[in-house]
Amino acid sequence: MVLLDIKGISKSFKELKAVDDLSFTIDEGEIFGLLGPNGAGKSTTISMIASLLPPDDGDIIYKNESIMTKPNKLQKELGLVPQDIALYPTLSGYDNLKFWGHVYGIRGKELKNRIEEITELIGLSDRIKDRVDKYSGGMKRRLNIGAALIHKPRLLIMDEPTVGIDPQSRNHILNTVKMLNKEGMTIIYTSHYMEEVEELCDRICILDKGKVLASGTKLELIKLINGRERIDVQFELLNSKFMEEIKKLFYIGEITVLDNRVSIISENAENLLGDLIQIIKNSNTRILSIDVQKPSLETVFLHLTGRALRD
Amino acid sequence: MSSILMLRLMQYKRDISIVLLMTALTIGFIFIFAGPNNGVYKYKILVATDEKTPSYVRFMNELYKNKSYEFIEADYDTVKAEVEEGKIIAGIYFKNDEISILKTKEDINIFILENLASNTLFSIQSMSDMAETIVNYIDNIKDVDNNAVETIAYNEILESVTEKKHMTVSKEYLNSVNTLEYDGTKHLTIGIILFMSMFTIVFGIGSILEDKEYHTWDKMLISPLSRKQILGGNLISTFIVGAGQILLLIVLTKQLMGMDWGDGEDIKLVVLIGLLFVMTTTSLGLMLSGAVKTQRQLSTITPIILTSTSMLGGAMWPLDIVQSKLLLFLANFTPQKWAIEGMEKIIIYGGELNDIISSIIVLMIMTVVFFTIGIVTLKHAD
């Protein structure tokens, strides 16, 4: 069942077209990934879905009703984990949860119980009475998620929830997302960490420069590159001789150069690797690493845009 | 809206020390500037004369009534020496029904003293002239008929006593022109309370900017709370804290310093003006919050705006001593001027509701104007 239907939405900020005729649907109970580099339009899309920004064009339908005209229905059932920490640093974690619970009409014992549940879920039971400005980055991120879950939202939007945190907190967040989804929550997950999106999402929409480049399940997207592998070569100093020689190989695939790194997507990575080492040797240049990667979303993105995801 | 009230209450609870510090500072400033023992610091002024004429005696009797200075009689050499040595700010030399002020510099207190002395002298001379006229009149008609004199004198006295014509004119003159009848303690107490409470109020409503910095503003906007509820909650919580602080300061100054806020009816009117002032300042804070983007920017501009408008509006000295027409004109655009004027009319000049109508109306207009601008700029900033 389609929960959210995005119909041709666009948004411009002066000269910049941040989102350009974007359309996709999100089914109830799925984790939908929005993948794209910084500036792809993910956060603008999220803001429009959350009814924070009105689209210039198009419409957003939630449970068969436009949120442009009736935002209330969505607002009650939406939980937003913004990219930035949205908490009151001088208040305790408990007071932050209490406030957000109150905002959504939860009171008294119900609120108290709900805070306990959330505190346990985000693993902050022993620090919940401390002021938020005493928390580590990871703890703040977890509380940020907790604040969005306090009212048991039906649709949870998570905008880059793991930016700048330690691996332990990151794992905790990813596990929490999986658990929430298992319980039936629909989740929109945006990230520029390809591994996270690959691990979590049922369907993925790849965005770049405000447009949908591709969308589908992970397998469907990888099919776009026909199972080709990627070889990344990191040079100490890339020279022109190497580039001239490598381009002479008739079976070479797509080549992308970024600073001193060369990425090659090829159907015949095994043969290419031998030739590549020979060319490196002949071109008298030093390399720092060679990395052969299995087909991944990162490769798909590189194939679609000619740029790496984290550029 | 109750969620926002709860939030602000939790924040104030956490930051209660700041609110208490502001209140304590206000009391401290009042204690320092409005002086101990329920009075401003009294400058000692020495007065000298060569001959203690009736005019001089009357002059001194009038001066002794003033609460702002302590007048002491001395000989001319002592007065001159003490002025030159800087022991006193100025001295008065009374000679042949004229006065001269001995001073080594110009400042606001000397300026006030000069006005006080010249007005007092003018006042007693006017009364003396009037008395002399009456004496001459009686002398002139003395030769006519004793019965007629008696009748005329009786009628004259009866008329003056009944209508109190000359007394009324004299009193009105003193009240309207003699700026120095004002009570410095009360004026400064009112001024400092209003000035200091403005900081609490403006920074209170500035929490909206904090919400934006903490990214909680956007989360609130997408929650079931409407924009009106969010703004309403912020305005009400700020109003409650601002009003609470002003009321607390009124009580504390009354209890600790014996400040006379008048009787029950007077206090009601003072509180009315105080609450209106809180409303106006809350709206002013909203307008300022809409004009800047961050709490830091608000923290930068607020002291500048509040201090300058407080100076302009007469929170630190009476506007009567300001001579610049431009400054007096600009003072009309500050809420401080109208609030101080309203409160002073009640507790210094014994005014009633009718006397403070202009203050009430202007403060209400300012509230509406600031509020409207604030709402528009905040919406534009989003």
Image (spheres, coloured by chain):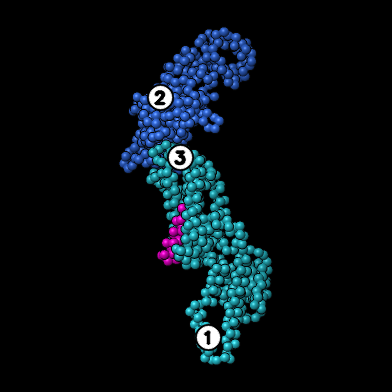
- The answer to whether the residue labelled 3 contacts the one labelled 2, judged by CB atoms less than 8 Å apart, is no
Q: Identify the residue under disc 3.
A: B217
Q: Identify the residue under disc 2.
A: A25
- Asked if B256 appears above or below B200 in the picture, the reply is below
Residue A183: image quadrant is top left
Report whether residue B247 is seen. Answer: yes
Let me know if residue B76 is in the magenta part.
no
Q: Secondary structure at mark 3?
A: helix
The answer for how far apart the CA atoms under marks 1 and 3 are is 81 Å
Q: Chain of mark 3?
A: B
Q: Which chain is cyan?
A: B
Mark 1 vs mark 3: same chain? yes
Instruction: Estimate the x, y position of residue B366 in percent, counting from the top left.
Output: 50, 53
Instruction: Estimate the x, y position of residue A136 in percent, counting from the top left.
Output: 46, 35
The residue nearer to you, when weighing A19 against B24, is A19
**Residue for point 52% across, 63% down:** B187
Position of the N terminus of chain A, as image quadrant, is top left
Residues in magenta, as a range: B256-280
